[in-house]
Image (tube, rainbow, N blue to C red):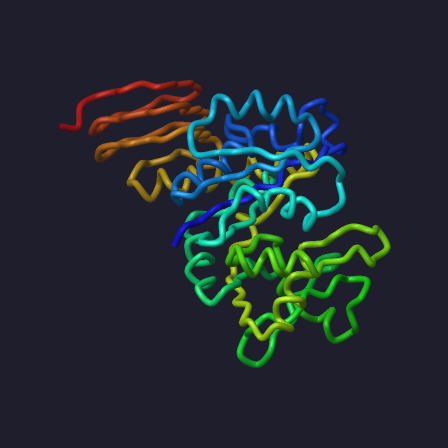
């Protein structure tokens, strides 16, 4: 299956109070957009990034990122469906299109691989469940757990508001099906925008099964403000620290261990508090890192 990822990265992110595009804000020492592109590269996908606000800044940033990446400009901000439509000329009929967001940087390869796998019949969507889903589009399914529509909060009945499963906006769909569906999306709504969520109802009406794939809440969070960016930083720090623990490294306090790269380690390694590990770190057997250290691109010890 040939995958082509369209990454929506045109938003201004005014709540960030920054002159830079929202997707250039960093977590773990790397821009949100670069994290998304690193994931698509691991999926062996082509990528087309839809630009808008601070397009020159994003283009300059992309010059330093390796991979099969092209760009397109969304001239007017007319909604998510319009953004995807602006990138369709870069795709081909033999591809499956994955839609991601430049400000949702922690979505896992495992979730996306499952999403791609479930799209073999034409269309799959990534969902998550929230204890309090107020304000989000609910996923309406039939008895066979086939998605039939996304119903926004303002349009939801009392029964639909009880649904806890929400649509993350991330989807995977055959190029031909996507192209046909986009032609039917209208801007007949209060904001007069073209919403990608409308695709679910449109494609479902064609008799195509739409398969929901559930993801963890943390990996599908986005960031529209510095507070939300800090929350992503905390989630990433916890994910990376847990990875160190899974590798057998002893941590004095995982909330005070900050990994901003990759770490390979031998047996019986330990890390004290307030340690930052950046770039490529290799630790031999029995290496102990003391408190309050910053290490970048180093090899310590020998595990041969």
The residue lying at 42 percent from left, 18 percent from top is 294
Quadrant containing the C terminus in the rendered view: top left
The residue nearer to you, when weighing 82 against 232, is: 82
Q: Is residue 4 left or right of residue 227?
A: left
User: Residue 162: image x %, image y %?
Assistant: 71, 71
Which residue of the protein is positioned furthest toward the right in this rendering? 190
Residue 193, placed above or below residue 262? below
User: Residue 138: image x %, image y %?
Assistant: 68, 65
Which residue of the protein is positioned furthest toward the left in this rendering? 304
Residue 172, placed above or below residue 70? below
The residue nearer to you, when weighing 136 against 112, is: 112
The residue lying at 48 percent from left, 21 percent from top is 64
User: Residue 160: image x %, image y %?
Assistant: 72, 72
Q: In this view, does 188 lie to the left or right of 91?
A: right
Residue 128, placed above or below residue 19? below
The residue lying at 78 percent from left, 68 percent from top is 156
Quadrant containing the N terminus in the rendered view: bottom left
Q: Where is residue 87, by image quadrant?
A: top right
Which residue of the protein is positioned furthest toward the bottom in this rendering? 143
User: Residue 186: image x %, image y %?
Assistant: 76, 58
Q: Is residue 239 left or right of residue 185?
A: left
The residue lying at 56 percent from left, 61 percent from top is 177
Q: Report the number of discs.
A: 0
Q: Where is residue 125, by image quadrant?
A: bottom right
Q: Where is residue 6, by image quadrant?
A: top right
């Amino acid at each position: 299956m040939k995958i082509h990822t369209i990454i929506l990265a045109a938003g201004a992110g005014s709540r960030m109070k920054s002159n830079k595009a929202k997707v250039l804000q960093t977590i773990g020492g790397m821009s949100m957009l670069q994290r998304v592109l690193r994931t698509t590269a691991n999926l062996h996908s082509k990528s087309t990034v839809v630009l808008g606000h601070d397009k020159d800044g994003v283009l300059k940033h992309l010059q330093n990122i390796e991979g099969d990446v092209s760009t397109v400009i969304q001239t007017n901000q007319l909604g998510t469906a319009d953004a995807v439509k602006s990138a369709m000329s870069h795709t081909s009929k033999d591809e499956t299109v994955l839609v991601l967001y430049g400000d949702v940087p922690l979505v896992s390869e495992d979730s996306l691989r499952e999403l791609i796998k479930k799209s073999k019949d034409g269309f799959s969507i990534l969902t998550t469940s929230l204890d309090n889903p107020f304000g989000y589009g609910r996923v309406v399914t039939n008895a066979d757990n086939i998605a039939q529509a996304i119903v926004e909060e303002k349009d939801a009945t009392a029964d639909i508001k009880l649904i806890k499963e929400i649509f993350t906006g991330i989807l995977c769909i055959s190029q031909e099906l996507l192209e046909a569906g986009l032609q039917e999306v209208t801007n007949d709504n209060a904001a007069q925008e073209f919403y990608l969520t409308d695709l679910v109802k449109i494609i479902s009406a064609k008799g195509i099964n739409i398969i929901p794939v559930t993801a963890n809440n943390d990996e599908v969070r986005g960031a529209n403000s510095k507070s939300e960016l800090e929350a992503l930083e905390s989630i990433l720090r916890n994910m990376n620290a847990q990875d160190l623990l899974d590798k057998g490294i002893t941590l004095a306090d995982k909330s005070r261990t900050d990994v901003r790269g990759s770490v390979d380690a031998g047996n019986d390694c330990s890390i004290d508090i307030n340690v930052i590990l950046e770039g490529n770190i290799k630790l031999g057997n029995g290496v102990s890192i003391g408190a309050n250290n910053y290490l970048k691109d180093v090899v310590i010890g020998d595990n041969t």
